[in-house]
Image (tube, coloured by chain):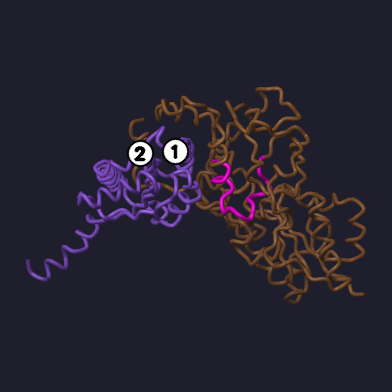
Chain colours: A brown, B purple
């Protein structure tokens, strides 16, 4: 029987997704038996020109990890889309922008200037910045152009399946590979296009911790208290993204006594993971009967315990959020006028 | 004024006459009735706002507000029952906490947080509804258009 062909590519991400694919233990033998790995820059020797030489639709499935934030990422996403029958958005960065997506609170100019000029360890007296084209004595050198805005994979190309997670867990990768294997060997139908290979519920559904009062009195950073491993994180005052995050990861962080940070993204029912978490967290403050007496300033003080709503609630999903990136008001806001 | 002069003056007048697009969420039990009272009392106010009635101000999911701004609304006003007056006992307290946090979030996204305002309007406060709309319209006019529309 003919083998299927698999490719994996690494765009704006950390490489953890590539390692996650290697991390599926003995299952990798099944992959090798079922599939030829035709392109995987960190593991096999095929080059971009080899991909360019393939006929359209030659690759059965491409697992694309990383967000799109420069011209090379975009070019490779489009190339691999053209050459693949199935395009899989693999990992949180490809699905929602991930941690690199937080660059959408700033822009290209500020990033380059900070990194090349203003970090405490920079000593760039000539104020050199990377240029996409450079004429060196040996010939012209080209590097990709950095974009102002980080994008998700599906904002650039059509995506068939999503496997979220930072990185996707072994069980989710196996679930997908099993489906492809069954499709290839037995002709079983693939999941419907656009499916997210994960649970339809929230992380709380998989979390074994006990929930009793469902209230929070005061917000703590995880290092400020001794976290009870049996009790709900939120009830202990630790911000945990569980209530607004898709399950499928097996609540691994919670089992390791760490709060959920939301890498699995929003559930199917909401568009904006951050908005959903903001709503949930604001609702569960335990205040009691005196709330009718509280002034607007008291409420501001209470909510100011959440130090960085954007960075906390959108740690993995800013480019996929409703607003997507930071905007710039023409007129300075009242607060900055006074300052 | 000659036709020519009028034609020349028109674009300038149009720029000056920019009216913000305001979205007003009113709770069914207090604020919507307040808006109704303002209407039947024939209180004059700007007309560049649209009202969406929700059963409670707490029904206004932060997502609604974010979507309104993403789709170009210049200001969003959330109106609910006064503290201790909520038809559902504590809905307005949840709204108040959410809006406080949402304003911080909007500021982090680069918006002027004053584009989102929460106010209490009871069923008997037609006059307050009128005042709130007038003031909010003025605030947003001074800020100018939603920066999302500029991009």
| Circle 2 residue | B120
Q: Nearer the viewer, residue A95 or B79?
A: B79
Instruction: State left or right for residue A331 relative to residue A100.
Output: left
Q: Position of residue B8 (x, y in %)?
A: 16, 65
Give the quarter of the figure containing the C terminus of chain B.
bottom left
Q: Do labels 1 and 2 touch, CB within 8 Å? A: yes
Q: Residues within 10 Å of mark 2 (few under 14, many from 20)?
A: many
Residue B101 shows up from this direction: no
Q: Nearer the viewer, residue B82 or A113?
A: B82
Residue at the far left: name it: B1
Instruction: State left or right for residue A189 relative to residue A243.
Output: right
Assign the magenta stretch its main secondary structure. Answer: loop
Q: Position of residue A263 (x, y in %)?
A: 68, 46
Could you say which quadrant of the image residue B130 lies in? Answer: top left
Instruction: State left or right for residue A243 relative to residue B114.
Output: right
Q: Chain of mark 1?
A: B
| Circle 1 residue | B92
Q: Chain of mark 2?
A: B
Secondary structure under badge 2? strand
Q: Which residues are magenta?
A: A261-278
Residue B28 on the magenta span: no
């Amino acid at each position: 029987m003919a083998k299927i062909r698999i490719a994996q590519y690494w765009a704006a991400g950390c490489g953890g997704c590539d390692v996650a694919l290697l991390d599926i233990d003995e299952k990798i033998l099944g992959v090798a038996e079922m599939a030829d790995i035709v392109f995987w820059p960190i593991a096999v020797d095929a080059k971009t020109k080899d991909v360019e030489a393939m006929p359209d639709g030659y690759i059965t499935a491409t697992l694309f990890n990383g967000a799109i934030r420069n011209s090379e990422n975009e070019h490779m996403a489009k190339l691999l889309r053209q050459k693949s029958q199935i395009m899989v958005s693999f990992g949180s960065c490809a699905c929602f922008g991930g941690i690199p997506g937080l660059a959408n609170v700033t822009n290209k100019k500020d990033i380059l200037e900070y990194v090349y000029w203003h970090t405490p360890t920079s000593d760039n007296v000539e104020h050199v910045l990377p240029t996409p084209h450079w004429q060196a004595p040996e010939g012209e050198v080209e590097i990709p152009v950095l974009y102002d805005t980080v994008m998700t994979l599906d904002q650039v190309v059509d995506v068939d399946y999503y496997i979220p997670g930072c990185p996707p867990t072994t069980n989710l990768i196996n679930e997908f590979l099993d489906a492809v294997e069954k499709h290839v060997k037995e002709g079983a139908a693939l999941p419907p296009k656009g499916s997210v290979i994960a649970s339809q519920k929230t992380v709380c559904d998989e979390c074994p911790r006990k929930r009793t009062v469902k209230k929070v009195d005061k917000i703590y950073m995880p290092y400020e208290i001794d976290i009870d491993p049996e009790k709900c994180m939120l009830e202990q005052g630790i911000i945990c993204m569980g209530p607004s995050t898709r399950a499928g990861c097996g609540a691994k962080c919670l089992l390791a006594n760490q709060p959920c940070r939301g890498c699995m993204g929003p559930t199917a029912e909401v568009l904006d993971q951050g908005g959903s978490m903001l709503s949930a967290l604001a609702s569960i403050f335990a205040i009691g009967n005196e709330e009718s007496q509280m002034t607007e300033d008291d409420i501001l003080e209470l909510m100011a315990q959440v130090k960085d709503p954007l960075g906390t609630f959108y740690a993995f999903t800013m480019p996929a959020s409703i607003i997507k990136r930071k905007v710039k008001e023409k007129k300075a806001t009242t607060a900055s006028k006074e300052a | 004024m000659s036709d020519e002069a009028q034609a020349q003056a028109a674009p300038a007048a149009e720029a000056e006459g920019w009216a913000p697009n305001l979205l007003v969420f009113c709770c069914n039990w207090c604020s919507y009735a307040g808006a109704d009272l303002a209407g039947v009392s024939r209180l004059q106010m700007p007309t560049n706002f649209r009202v969406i009635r929700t059963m409670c101000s707490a029904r206004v999911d932060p997502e609604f507000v974010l979507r309104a701004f993403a789709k170009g609304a210049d200001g969003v006003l959330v109106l609910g029952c006064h503290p201790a007056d909520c038809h559902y006992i504590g809905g307005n307290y949840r709204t108040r906490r959410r809006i406080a946090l949402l304003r911080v979030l909007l500021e982090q996204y680069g918006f002027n947080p004053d584009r989102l305002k929460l106010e209490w309007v009871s069923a008997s406060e037609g006059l307050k509804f009128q005042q709130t709309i007038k003031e909010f319209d003025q605030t947003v006019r001074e800020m100018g258009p939603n920066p999302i529309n500029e991009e």
